[in-house]
Image (cartoon, grey):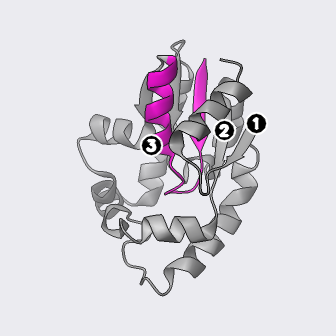
């Protein structure tokens, strides 16, 4: 079984997937880290040198390979992954998809502390960040909402979120 965690950057996908994979003894794959490993370039370097379209192509190739595997995997996806190509369709077809729903306020709080690591928001002022996130989230929610399961992460401990995922999937 493959469990795919989707959601906006800062929603907790990496953190939750790590705890979940340990708890249920599944292999953990972070799609962004996998792309970095394969290309020997960081995500910001790929964006800078080759552009976002090239990155999305690499992302799609890695996604298809992982989803085709027979392993038990917890897959942490990049925030933009569900938006491109027919990615959401293949994610739902080949895995159990879980949308980690997070409010704009919570996302702003988390992301304002890590802007330099996030190429999409690196050059956005703190003042403009809430509006940017709100617009971006509005555009992406139509894709995220196609996930088979959806749960809120606001004001919740990661362990409680993991417990809810395990209950929803009857693991």
- Badge 1 element: loop
Which residue is nearer to you in this view: 147 or 11?
Answer: 11
Q: Which residue is mark 3?
A: 14
Q: Verify CB contact (< 8 Å) between mark 1 and mark 2.
A: yes
- Badge 3 element: helix
Check the picture and name the quadrant holding the N terminus: top right
Seen at 63% across and 52% down, the residue is 83
Is there any visible trace of residue 86 in the rendered image?
Answer: no
Q: Which residue is mark 2?
A: 98
Q: Residues within 10 Å of mark 3 (few under 14, many from 20)?
A: many
Seen at 64% across and 64% down, the residue is 103
Which residues are drawn in magenta?
A: 1-24
Seen at 64% across and 74% down, the residue is 135
Q: Earlier in the sequence, mark 2 or mark 3?
A: 3
- Badge 2 element: strand
**130 shown above or below 81:** below
Q: Residues within 10 Å of mark 2 (few under 14, many from 20)?
A: many
Occupied quadrant, residue 30: top left
Which residue is nearer to you in this view: 77 or 17?
Answer: 17
Q: Residue 40 at x, y = what percent?
A: 23, 41
Q: Which residue is mark 1?
A: 148
How many numbered tags mark residues here?
3
Q: Is residue 13 magenta?
A: yes
Q: Earlier in the sequence, mark 1 or mark 2?
A: 2
Q: Residue 164 at x, y = what percent?
A: 67, 34
Calculate the distance from the C-alpha at mark 1 to the C-alpha at mark 2.
6 Å
Occupied quadrant, residue 37: top left
Q: Residue furthest left?
A: 40
Calculate the distance from the C-alpha at mark 1 to the C-alpha at mark 3.
19 Å
Q: Residue furthest bottom?
A: 127
Is there any visible trace of residue 130 in the rendered image?
Answer: yes
């Amino acid at each position: 079984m493959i469990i795919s965690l989707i959601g906006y950057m800062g929603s907790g996908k990496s953190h939750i997937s790590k705890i979940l994979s340990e708890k249920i003894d599944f292999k953990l794959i972070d799609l962004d880290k996998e792309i970095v490993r394969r290309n020997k370039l960081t995500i910001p370097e790929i964006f800078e040198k080759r552009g976002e379209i090239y990155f999305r192509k690499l992302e799609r190739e890695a996604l298809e390979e992982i989803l085709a595997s027979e392993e038990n995997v917890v897959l942490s996806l990049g925030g933009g992954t569900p938006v491109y190509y027919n990615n959401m369709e293949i994610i739902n077809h080949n895995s159990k998809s879980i949308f980690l729903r997070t409010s704009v306020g919570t996302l702003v709080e988390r992301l304002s502390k890590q802007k330099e690591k996030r190429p999409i928001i690196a050059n956005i002022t703190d003042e403009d960040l809430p509006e940017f996130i709100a617009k971006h989230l509005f555009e992406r929610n139509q894709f995220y909402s196609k996930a088979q399961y959806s749960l809120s992460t606001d004001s919740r401990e990661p362990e409680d979120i993991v417990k809810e995922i395990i209950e929803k999937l009857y693991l």
